């Protein structure tokens, strides 16, 4: 080995010895003695935070998010089939009601006003 390599190893050994000597203080006394003492409230907060972290992440279920997830997980064909079935079910139940409503709608219809070409004053301006 060259002289430079021997000097480098000696320098590294000296550095490691200095680090070990510096860290020996922590072997003799606990780390808590070196940290500034905390108030009881701060200590309680740290304990509570440590307990929360130990429990793991919380699982919060969002009803709308779960519906979206399920809807997106289904294939488009299945969603379509479900929608057709629901529509058929709605038509079956509302068919008798539509016959009665047709007569009532005829009387209640209103002719289009003459001012339909004018902008509605209540319409949102863009």
Image (cartoon, rainbow, N blue to C red):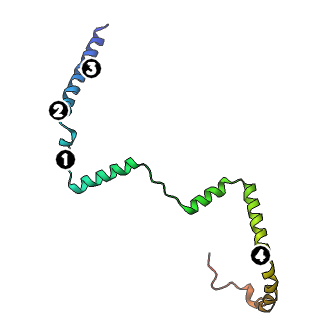
Where is mark 2, residue-wise? Answer: 28
Q: CA distance from mark 2 to mark 1?
A: 18 Å
Looking at this view, is 110 or 46 the one in front? 46
Tell me the element at label 1.
loop
Mark 2 closeness class: few <14, some 14–19, many ≥20 residues within 10 Å = few
Mark 4 closeness class: few <14, some 14–19, many ≥20 residues within 10 Å = few
| Left or right: 103, with 34 as reference point | right
Q: Earlier in the sequence, mark 2 or mark 4?
A: 2
The residue at the far top in this view is 1
Q: Earlier in the sequence, mark 1 or mark 3?
A: 3
Asked which quadrant contains residue 90, the reply is bottom right
- Give x and y (percent) for residue 53: 38, 48
Which dot, 1 or 3, sits closer to the camera?
A: 1
Which dot, 2 or 4, sits closer to the camera?
A: 4
The numbered mark at residue 12 is: 3
Which image quarter is the C terminus in?
A: bottom right
Residue at (25% x, 19% y) in the render:
13
Q: CA distance from mark 4 to mark 3?
A: 88 Å
Where is mark 1, residue-wise? Answer: 36
Q: Earlier in the sequence, mark 3 or mark 2?
A: 3
Q: CA distance from mark 3 to mark 2?
A: 25 Å
Q: CA distance from mark 1 to mark 4?
A: 74 Å
Asked which quadrant contains residue 8, the reply is top left
Where is mark 4, residue-wise? Answer: 93
Q: Earlier in the sequence, mark 2 or mark 1?
A: 2
Where 97 falls versus 33 (above or below)? below
Which dot, 2 or 1, sits closer to the camera?
A: 2
């Amino acid at each position: 080995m060259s002289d430079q390599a021997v000097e480098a190893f000696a320098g590294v050994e000296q550095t490691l010895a200095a680090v070990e000597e510096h860290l020996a203080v922590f072997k003799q006394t606990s780390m808590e003695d070196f940290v500034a003492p905390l108030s009881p409230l701060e200590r309680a907060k740290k304990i509570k935070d440590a307990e929360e972290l130990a429990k793991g992440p919380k699982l919060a279920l969002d009803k709308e998010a779960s519906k979206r997830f399920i809807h997106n997980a289904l294939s488009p064909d299945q969603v379509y089939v479900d929608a057709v079935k629901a529509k058929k079910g709605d038509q079956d139940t509302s068919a008798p009601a539509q016959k009665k409503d047709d007569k009532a709608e005829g009387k209640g219809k209103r002719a289009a006003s003459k001012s339909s070409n004018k902008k509605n004053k209540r319409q949102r301006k863009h």
